[in-house]
Image (cartoon, helix red, strand yellow):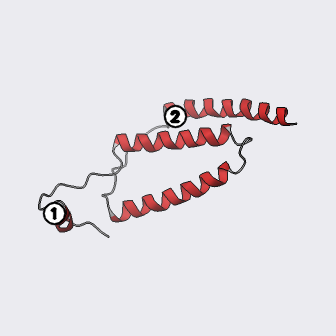
Amino acid sequence: MLLTKAKVRLILGGIYTDIPPVATPLVQSLHDRVAVLQFGFITIFVAAFPLAPLFALLNNWLEIRLDAHKFIRETRRPVAERCQNIGVWFTILDAIVQLAVISNVRQTRSAA
């Protein structure tokens, strides 16, 4: 359902406010944190629960579909911002990968 100004007025009882864009820094930061947290859990504990990547794939597929619907139907287009790199997230992801290698090597050696 596409929200027009008239529908928003009707929903809000006659008071109209602009629908905020989705990609505010706080919301975008939350999505980044959740993605990095999920990546960490999957890479560190994949030896303990091998089906975790499949569940993460299904979760991400569903989330992408729901976000696409939300972007198309309910919100305004986010303003794009250009940046050089991913900043501190690269260091965080690198540390998670190093920890995952150590964790998975120890888990596979103890299981053998």
Q: Residues within 10 Å of mark 2 (few under 14, many from 20)?
A: few
- Secondary structure beneath label 2: helix
**Which residue is painted at 73% across and 41% down in the image?**
48
- The single residue placed furthest to the left in the displayed view is 14
Which residue is under mark 2?
89
- Amino acid on which the number 2 mark rests in the picture: Trp
Could you tell me residue 78's position as x and y percent?
34, 52
- The single residue placed furthest to the right in the displayed view is 112
Dividing the picture into quadrants, the one containing residue 92 is: top right
Separation of residues labelled 1 and 2 (CA atoms): 40 Å
Q: Residues within 10 Å of mark 1 (few under 14, many from 20)?
A: some
Could you tell me residue 4's position as x and y percent?
22, 67
Ranked by sequence position, the earlier of labels 1 and 2 is: 1
Q: Quadrant of the C terminus?
A: top right
- The single residue placed furthest to the bottom in the displayed view is 1
Tag 1–tag 2 contact (CB < 8 Å): no
**Which residue is painted at 43% across and 58% down in the image?**
67
Q: In the rendered view, tell whether residue 46 sits above or below residue 6.
A: above
Please indicate, yes or no, whether residue 82 appears anywhere in the rendered image.
no
Dividing the picture into quadrants, the one containing residue 29 is: top left
Could you tell me residue 41's position as x and y percent?
61, 40
Q: Quadrant of the N terminus?
A: bottom left
Which residue is under mark 1?
9
**Which residue is painted at 52% across and 34% down in the image?**
89
